[in-house]
Image (tube, coloured by chain):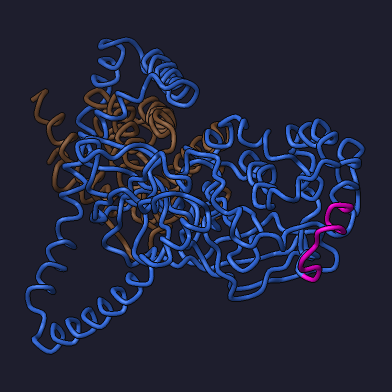
Amino acid sequence: MNSEPRFRMILTTLVALILSVLPLPPWLEPARPAFLVLTVLYWSIAAPRAGGIALGWFGGLALDVFQGPVLGQHALALAFITYICVREHQKIRSKPAFQQALIVFAALTIYEFIVFAIDGWSGHPMTSPARWLHTVTSAMIWPFAAAFLTHRYGRSS
Amino acid sequence: MAAFGTGASRQLQGRGGSPGFRFTLYALLSIVVMFLDERSHWLENARYVLQAAAYPIQLAVSSPSAAVSWLQQSFATRDALQSENNRLRSQQREIEMRDMRFEALQKENAELRGLREALPPVADRWEVAEVVNVQLNSLRQRVLLNRGTSNGVFKGQAVMDEKGLLGQTLHVGPWSAEVILITDPEHAVPVEIERNGLKTIAVGAGDTASLALPYLPANADVKTGDLLVTSGLGGVFPAGYPVARVAEVRRDAVQPLAQIRATPLAHIDIDREAMLVWFREEHPAAPGTVGMTDTAKGNAKMHPLAAPARPAPDHAVGSEAGAASAATSQPTPAASLSKPKPSAPRATEPPAPRTTEPPAPRATEHASPEPAASQPAPRRKAPVAAPPAESAPESAPESPASNAAASSPPEQQ
């Protein structure tokens, strides 16, 4: 019972990583939801003890390898919002889907702000407003992503 | 979901400490990792391994589009193939004709320069790499190529296609290399305008279709349609490779600098193939050397005519000498109006110091050239283009002053 959710977790995170590097037409790219972040957030709310911060950190590190200018940047940001969600998972879990989406939006804004700040500090500034667009699209697909993950991989109870 | 309940949260404390403690650990770890990655190069090996680990995923992600293009290729119609064949054949004929001329020109060039043998071309060898169709970063202009250190690829290698410059390698893994394109906002290419040899820097504008030339004064001699070629400064790209064509020049009376956009010649967004190029290091046009290559290339037009509008005290002397020498040996006065102010004083710099110039600009250009950091390089070396006759005796005493000006460039922007 202990290893099974972890297996699912790693599998879904891997799929989310693939979704977030899948080539898209250029006009659609900035709107691509942060699939990996959503997946990690889902698991940190649904199964905080199995994955949690470690999953967030390693998922973020994978993102760094694929697309970050600095190693550890997405790892720190994702570990931080995972920490918040793990701490507050009971409160978040009891909320209806719409409020959950708002919370996810706030978490993603924090996440993107940390990434943005580290971009600036490390000398790779990227001030395009398009970088904030994915927080909105991610929040919009959160209810569907959460429902899908619950249906496919979550507990049936 | 609710099955976890309170039992889960009690267990949260049990394994590996509380979430806060674990988060602190991971935060410290990532800060250390970031610091090591950015400030020192201890993590190069780790990055290498991680890039190797990521490559299978990237290949898997790009495989559907690769399969589609393979299918398209294998089901191409006979007509399409035939027309392509005809086109290629005529293209090959054209290239052969030009190549014939090339041999003759190379010999003639060598004779003019007094070299005993014609130099081999600066490009030693090249290897065609395919673009792995993966989204690396939606806001930065990066692509992944399917060649790595196992093919001899190194960091900071020039990447081109058949039309022009594409970019340079940034992170190299064993089988893959991440390329930063010239249109990335963090990338800057030292270029010169082919028509008159005016040197400047082309900075990526962040989209696939344009480069910006932010450091040219409003009175610079730039026209729409001018070809920009690499100037060979900066230590990554050799001289003379086409980069972009000027698409738009806007001169605002209020702004001291012209706003210039250029369109890259390489097909940056649609390319499926790119060439990694190795250059002969001993060749005079090679990026590593402080080249004398363009002394013969008619850059006499670059001589300054007028004294700078706002002479800084430390190079005022030099600029007077520059104006004087320009007045004595000025072949084409009209074009010289274009010369930007900051490099005017240094046109009098004798040729000796520039050969001893440190490789600093090479280092600034390499990994992630910021415009501010790499900008001084071409300005400083702009006089290289001036013919040696220009460094007449009267300019020799001024050389310390102009060297001092050269070593403190940032305030001259």
Which segment did they paint magenta?
B323-334
In the rendered structure, the answer to whether residue B384 lies left or right of residue B118 reads right
Q: Can see residue A93?
A: no
Q: Is residue B174 above or below residue B68?
A: above
- Place of residue B349 in the rendered image (x, y in percent of width and height, measured from the top left): 75, 41
Does the stretch in magenta take in B331?
Answer: yes
In magenta segment, residue B176: no
Horizontal side of B301 relative to B365 (left or right) equals right
- Closer-to-camera residue (B389/A51): B389
Residue B19 placement (x, y as % from top left): 36, 18
Say if residue A82 shows up in the picture: yes
Question: Residue at position x 47%, y 38% from top?
Answer: B288
The one nearer the camera, B156 or B1, is B156
- Residue A53 lies, in percent from the top left, at 33, 25
At horizontal 16% and vertical 85% (from top left) the residue drawn is B80
Residue at 39% over, 50% down? B117
Q: How many marks?
A: 0
| Visual hue assigned to chain A | brown
Picture layout, residue B307 above or below residue B359: below
Chain displayed in blue: B
Which of the image's four quarters has the N terminus of chain B? top left
Q: Which of B410/B357 is in front?
A: B357
Would you identify the image quadrant in which residue A7 lies? top left
Quick check: B86 above or below B27? below
Direction from residue A131 to residue A25 in the image, left or right: left
- The picture places residue B12, in percent across and down from the top left corner, at 29, 17
Pick whichever, B166 or B403, lies toward us: B403
Residue, x 33% and y 67% (percent of image)?
Answer: B270
**Is B112 positioned to the left or the right of B60 in the image?**
right
Q: Quadrant of residue A88?
A: top left
For the stretch drawn in magenta, the main secondary structure is: helix
